[in-house]
Image (spheres, rainbow, N blue to C red):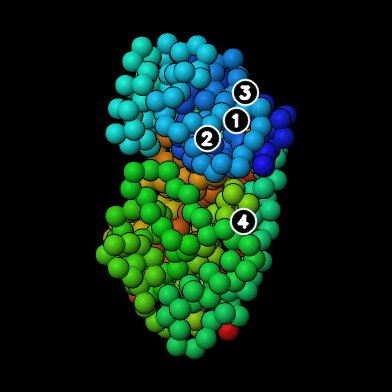
Amino acid sequence: MKQLLLIDKQEQALRVSRVVDGMKAASTDAVLLADNASKYYLTGRVYAGYIYVTVNGDVTCFVQRPVELDGPEVVYIRKPEELPSVIRDIPSRLGLELDIMSYSNVGRLKAIFPDSEIDNASTVMRRAREIKTPAEIALISESGVRQERVYRRVPHLYREGMTDIELQVEIERVSRLEGCLGQFRISGDSMELFMANIITGDNADAPSPYDFAMGGAGMSPSLPVGANGSEIKPGYTVMVDVNGNYTGYMTDMTRVYSLGEICDEAKKAHECSCRIHRELTEAGRPGTEAKALYERAIEIVTEEGLRHLFMGHRQHARFIGHGVGIEINELPVIAPRSRDIIRPGQVIALEPKFVIPGVGAVGVENTYVVTENGWECLTNAPEDITGLR
């Protein structure tokens, strides 16, 4: 038998306390969580079943599969209809992850708990995971170190005549050998991506249906984002945004490479991206409104005469940063309507990017941890546009 819990009890208690704080604010008596991200957050592993947390901080793991898990918090069930016979006090208000749970599963659980008022626990969990513990930050930092090693090898992977997808395959191979899990957890009802987003030339200007900073047509209408088989040509940039999940916690990093000389406008836009990083990480002290950082970025690109190219050309993304952790799109969000406040312990990917028609995409994305004293960068590969060899 294997112990279910893979984080120590003290670490679990800290994470549970954050969930409980959210439950108290929402007047929820208990939450029944089925999402893999939530189970991983509270136990350190993924299993089939549920994790049940009461407002008193009691945790029960209802397991369906695998059969080898053990521990004082483990209760095996065959189906969710068994839950009421095991739960000691049926909650008056029960939280479910309604934002991501299927309609049929919600209906089934409502029938199982007919006397409980159902709350939406999705926001409770997103807020609990927004502020990372020191143990989580250590795992994110380790992902950043490994991701940096991969990016430093990118120029040496290029061969003359390569297409974007051929370069992507080589980068993904190196990433997997470095330990990348390949899993790219994304929250949302229409967010899909494979291991990497590699775009070159005018493919950077191809609008995508997904809410990503950069689009790309992709290799198939079934996944219309990223590399589309374009040849990497002289004067083109290659934007590399590759999966940084090495520990179950992700970093998000983008770097730009070029084949030969690129135009001055592309160089100017890339330097503007670096300027935005410098100014926003200095301005984003704890207590700052996230939307104020977005507004400052817009002021900078307007001053530089680059607003029409910012976060896309034909189609523009309406954010410049997002939280990362177990999922690639966590809180906070750096966007014009964001209500988030910058707080110590947040881990934020900042990605001010530009699309230059006829050249490609430029701009830097870094992952930072917010501290009491400022923002600490966790993705430290060189930020200059690097030539492909």
Q: How far apart are marks 2 and 4 (CA)?
A: 26 Å
The residue nearer to you, when weighing 232 against 88, is 88
Do residues under tags 2 and 1 come within 8 Å of each other at their CB atoms? Answer: yes
- On the image, numbered disc 2 is attached to which residue? 63
Secondary structure under the numbered disc 3 in the rendered image = helix
- Name the residue located 42 percent from the left edge and 11 percent from the top edge: 92
Do residues under tags 4 and 1 come within 8 Å of each other at their CB atoms? Answer: no
Select label 4 or label 1 by which is in front. 1
- On the image, numbered disc 4 is attached to which residue? 246
Q: Quick check: can you spot residue 375?
A: no
Q: Distance between the residues labelled 3 and 1?
A: 20 Å
Looking at the picture, how far across and down is residue 29, in whole percent? Answer: 48, 14
Q: What residue type is disc 3 on?
A: Ser
Q: Quick check: can you spot residue 181?
A: yes
Secondary structure under the numbered disc 4 in the rendered image = loop
Q: Left or right of 316: which side holds 23?
A: right
Select label 2 or label 3 by which is in front. 2
Q: What residue type is disc 2 on?
A: Val
Which label's residue is closer to the chain start, 3 or 4?
Answer: 3
- On the image, numbered disc 1 is attached to which residue? 74
Which label's residue is closer to the chain start, 2 or 3?
Answer: 3
Q: How far apart are marks 3 and 4 (CA)?
A: 26 Å
Q: Distance between the residues labelled 2 and 3?
A: 22 Å
Q: Distance between the residues labelled 4 and 1?
A: 28 Å
Q: Mark number for residue 261?
A: none
